[in-house]
């Protein structure tokens, strides 16, 4: 089994949410942690759940369904509950909007760590969405197969991208115009890249091929509790 992890980075108004909507539209089974309330039934074809219990009941029924797109809203702890359940749903696409709320540089909750480190065993694709790359936990970007960045200019973010994807990628990100993207692939990720991302690269030379990343060893995961069957960061990096 395998999965695809994508991190999408861009400031407000850059076009990142539009891109993620296109990724969602390609899939039959999607769970969106809709932190900013960006998704609507009419425009995006999603079912929105505002109440935690109603959302959990809906998730319990998903194994019977061949198609669903749920936008789940709630407090951070409630959304982590949704992510805990999402791990039990093979083949789903999980979209984590405003990712720093759930996986800051200092803390990676067990619910997110399990998806990042073990989601491949259940073919759970994931999209992490953030305005600034330096505000998400390093293990998320380290395990991402595809990094998609709109323009970034803050020195801290550019340094972060240089460490994660190399100096060439960071330089390209800094020089992007409005709505342009730079894309960094690892391994064979380009062959599995979703069409909406490839479409943004047509006519541009903004992709970087797989290259050795500096500083990509998984950091020690700070969690409340990681259960014994979770891979360690070192195991994940070795595979």
Image (cartoon, rainbow, N blue to C red):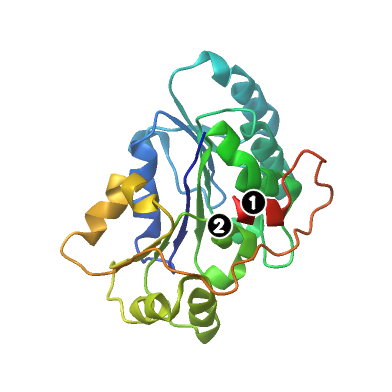
Which residue occupies the foreground of this view, 131 or 93?
Answer: 93
On residue 61, the disc is none
Mark 1 closeness class: few <14, some 14–19, many ≥20 residues within 10 Å: some
Which residue occupies the foreground of this view, 73 or 68?
Answer: 68
Which residue is most to the front? Answer: 238
Which residue occupies the foreground of this view, 148 or 37?
Answer: 148
Which residue is most to the left? Answer: 203
210 in relation to 163, above or below? above
On residue 98, the disc is 2
202 in relation to 119, above or below? below
Asked whether, in this view, residue 112 is left or right of residue 145, the answer is right
Asked whether, in this view, residue 9 is left or right of residue 199, the answer is right
On residue 236, the disc is 1
Residue 154: image location, x then y, percent: 49, 83
Residue drawn at the location 64% of the way across and 26% of the way down = 54
Residue 193: image location, x then y, percent: 34, 48
Quadrant hosting residue 12: bottom left
Whether residue 159 can be seen here: yes
Residue drawn at the location 75% of the way across and 62% of the way down = 220
Asked whether, in this view, residue 177 is left or right of residue 152, the answer is left
Where disc 1 sits, the SS reads helix
Residue 65: image location, x then y, percent: 49, 16
Mark 2 closeness class: few <14, some 14–19, many ≥20 residues within 10 Å: some
Quadrant hosting residue 205: bottom left
Closer to the N terminus: mark 2 or mark 1?
2
């Amino acid at each position: 089994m395998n999965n695809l992890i994508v991190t999408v980075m861009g400031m407000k108004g850059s076009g990142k949410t539009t891109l993620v909507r296109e990724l969602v539209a390609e899939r039959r089974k999607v769970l969106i942690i809709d932190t900013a309330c960006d998704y609507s039934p009419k425009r995006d074809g999603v079912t929105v759940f505002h109440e935690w219990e109603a959302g959990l009941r809906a998730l319990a029924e998903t194994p019977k369904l061949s198609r669903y797109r749920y936008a789940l809203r709630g407090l951070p702890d409630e959304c982590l509950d949704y992510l805990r359940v999402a791990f039990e749903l093979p083949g789903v696409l999980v979209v984590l909007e405003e990712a720093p709320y759930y996986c800051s540089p200092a803390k990676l909750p067990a619910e997110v760590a399990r998806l990042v480190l073990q989601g491949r065993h259940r073919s759970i694709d994931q999209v992490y969405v953030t305005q600034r790359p330096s505000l998400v936990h390093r293990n998320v970007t380290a395990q991402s197969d595809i990094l998609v960045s709109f323009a970034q200019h803050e020195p801290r973010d550019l340094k972060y991208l240089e460490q994660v994807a190399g100096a060439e990628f960071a330089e390209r990100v800094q020089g992007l115009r409005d709505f342009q993207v730079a894309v960094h692939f690892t391994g064979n990720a380009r062959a599995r890249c979703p069409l909406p991302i490839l479409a943004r690269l047509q006519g541009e030379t903004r992709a970087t091929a797989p290259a050795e990343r500096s500083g990509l060893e998984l950091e020690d995961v700070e969690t409340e509790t990681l259960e014994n069957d979770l891979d360690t960061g070192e195991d994940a990096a070795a595979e």
